[in-house]
Image (cartoon, rainbow, N blue to C red):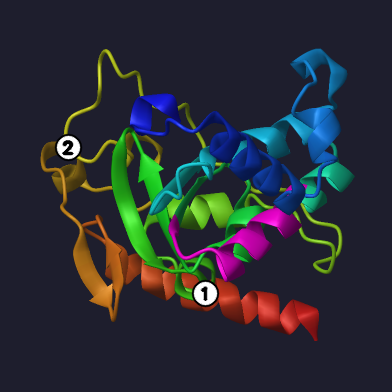
Amino acid sequence: AKAHGWRDKEAVRKQALDLLNFVQLDAERVINAYPHELSGGMRQRVLIAMSLLLNPQVLILDEPTTALDILTQRTIITLLRRLKEEKNFTMIFISHDLAIAAELADRIATMYGGRLVEVGPTDQLFYSPRHPYTLGLIRAVPTVTGGFEELSSIPGSPPDFINMPSGCKFHPRCAFATEKCSQEEPDLEPVSNGHYAACWHWREVKVEVDRWNEVRAAAAN
């Protein structure tokens, strides 16, 4: 706070106490506590409070629920939803947990090999993915309503950043890949309103997604 122009220590302390209360902590106790005296969930909430101290316009959260138990995760998610509703800022949420991303995000971007490969509204990305990697991620998520079935997985391994493959970085693992994919890297292009994918074969992906959705709908009935 001092580095950003705050000079009044009492004002900084009051703001810190207010924010600790906002994230549902015992502010007077926590502000004088050492990290080892707090639980993992409490430390995470302290970090969130610290990030709000200077009233940011953009808040970046990198895996904020990783290594937390389920109940603590739920507490953090509830807090983030409250922040989203009450604070007027943009939240960039980075996570490997698709369920949490779906719960919090208005738009989702999928990254592979350091590049954005798909961007779109949350419901479109989950129900109408247009990039093979996004489709593979969604298929790999177990469901509690789909009966007993073998979990899907994406074959191969993530790319080596020292020796990246040519063309589309996903092509060595992609069931839709052709020779063009190994030679030319696609740019993001619109596939529907507000929805973009970097794939030469997103139309073939659409056909596969439509078929998969029909199978899931039939199984649910």
91 vs 149, left or right, is left
Q: Within the image, what quadrant is residue 112 found in?
A: top left
* Residue drawn at point x = 15 percent, y = 53 percent: 187
The amino acid sitting under disc 1 is Asp
The vertical placement of 7 against 80, above or below, is: above
The vertical placement of 8 against 22, above or below, is: above
* Residue 152 within the segment the image draws in magenta: no
Name the element at disc 2. loop
Q: Which residue is mark 2?
A: 167
The amino acid sitting under disc 2 is Gly
**Magenta stretch mostly in which secondary structure?**
helix
Q: Which mark is residue 123?
A: 1
* Residue 86 within the segment the image draws in magenta: yes
10 Å crowding of disc 1: few (<14), some (14-19), many (20+): some
16 vs 92, left or right, is right
- Region in magenta: 76-90
145 vs 177, left or right, is right
